[in-house]
Amino acid sequence: MNKETIQAEPFKIKMVEPIRLIPRSEREARIEEADYNVFGLKPEDVYIDLLTDSGTSAMSDRQWAGLMMGDESYAGSRNFDHLQQTIKELMGFKYVVPTHQGRPAENILTAALIKPGQKVPGNTHFDSTMAHILQKKGVPVNLPIPEAMKTDIYHPFKGNVDIKKLESFLEKEKGNTSFFLMTVTNNTGGGQPVSMGNIRKVREITSKYGIPFFFDAARFAENAYFIKEREEGYADKSIREIVWEMMSYADGCTMSAKKDGLVNMGGFICMNDEGLYEQCCEMLILLEGFITYGGLSGRDLEALAIGLQEVVEEDYLRYRIEQVRYLGSRLMDAGIPIINPTGGHAVYVDAKAFLPHIPQSQFPGQVTAVELYIEAGVRSSEIGAVAFARKDEETGEVVYPELELTRLAIPRRVYTNRHMDVVAEGLERVSRRKESVRGLKITWEPDVLRHFMAKFARL
Ligand SMILES: *Cc1c(COP(=O)(O)O)cnc(C)c1O
């Protein structure tokens, strides 16, 4: 890697979208009107939007040019050929099934593979993946390494699966296991990478027990960059070589291209097994559309084909990972507790440690998101008690998630490091007045996925 010179963003800006910081008194009014739920804010009232890295990427001039090359033929679009060729050269899988985003890919693959009652082990399943497994009457099983849950200790590959646990799990459940799913990077665990060594071990064990091995590849390129940077033997390999090796161990993948596809909408499924491909095509036609467009326009397929080539460029990935790291190190320097090390796509503030005087029942993760908006116009999201607390059906008691986090997800190629300074300085100002910050209570909530719609009031 070229460490000789100071590196700035590896692009110049050709088109701009104005953003505006509304006055503090207005921010206070807007968040109150939104019932202290950042999902209720209007984008024009947000200065820097770190709600999600999904579908929020800036496309390149080449991708925009690609949109003009859309072949909107119902069957056999040349853009699909381009996408298929690109994926084959990058990942090496035989078959490509296009979908309009990640979850239809999950829906189709889980429907094809899971028989009722079967287990689906993984490092940590993403929430939509878990929902699709449960909907097919499967049982999602998370087997992360123990370090994954410790926010303050360094481990280079916190996304790894616990190999010993996996082996004893399969020894017991091999007859009752559908497939293994490895999420790269591990989104739920903080965007943490998985090592090549871990992937190789998973291949050995799943082969031994005859279990198919798939990737949830939403952030495959970011994962590859971490392998290059941190794993012995990979420093001199190209990102493409690393991606190729990662994928060579798997039987296929699902992909939300709204992340490392560098597009605003798109996804796909890959596999080597012809029978599985045919099964998936049948469902695709039923749910998404013909096998050469799968719910996308020809122009979208073209932008995705180009995005997949750009996302494995090392200059881009260096900027990407370094920007996340830059924000993380600014926060750590200011004494703000975060998941360490930072992962690929977001910085996660440990809200329990940040606001220790606010109990988890008063939603410190949500409070941090609200205060950061008031302080700096920055939108983040809660990943803690609001999203994940559950009532125990037997005792009626509320069970709180282990981690109480506020996620600062960084869109790809959208912001400069000066924007990151504004975010860090905003949180520093919250930190200086944090003793006076109060908790929240829920005044209304829907039955499912309450974090999107819940209403809050200040205590
Ligand atoms: C976003 C995401 C999904 C779901 O993809 P959508 O495009 O939002 O439907 C699945 N898995 C992971 C790891 C994700 O980050």
Image (tube, rainbow, N blue to C red):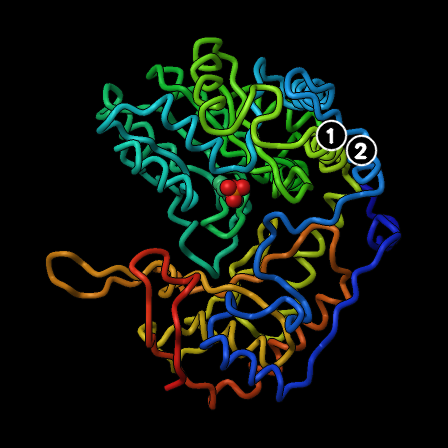
Instruction: Identify the element where label 2 is drawn.
Output: helix
The N terminus lies in quadrant: top right
Q: Tell me what residue is drawn at x 48 percent, y 61 percent.
A: 152
Residue 195 in percent (x, y) is at: 54, 35
Based on the displayed image, in which of its 4 quarters is residue 163 positioned?
A: top left
The residue that mark 1 highlights is 302
Pick whichever, 104 or 92, lies toward us: 104
Distance from mark 2 CB to nearest ligand 1 atom below 8 Å: no
State if disc 1 and disc 2 touch (CB < 8 Å): yes
Horizontally, is 289 left or right of 451 in the view?
A: right
Q: Say if 360 sits above or below 231 in the image.
A: below
Q: Amino acid at mark 2?
A: Gly
Q: Earlier in the sequence, mark 2 or mark 1?
A: 2
Q: Amino acid at mark 1?
A: Glu
Q: Tell me what residue is drawn at x 57 percent, y 31 percent.
A: 295
The residue that mark 2 highlights is 66
Residue 373 in percent (x, y) is at: 58, 75
Residue 149 in percent (x, y) is at: 40, 54
Distance from mark 1 CB to nearest ligand 1 atom below 8 Å: no
Count every numbered label the image shows and give the total. 2
Q: Tell me what residue is drawn at x 45 percent, y 71 percent.
A: 366
Pick whichever, 291 or 38, lies toward us: 291
Q: Say if 25 sits above or below 256 in the image.
A: below
Instruction: Identify the element where label 1 is drawn.
Output: helix
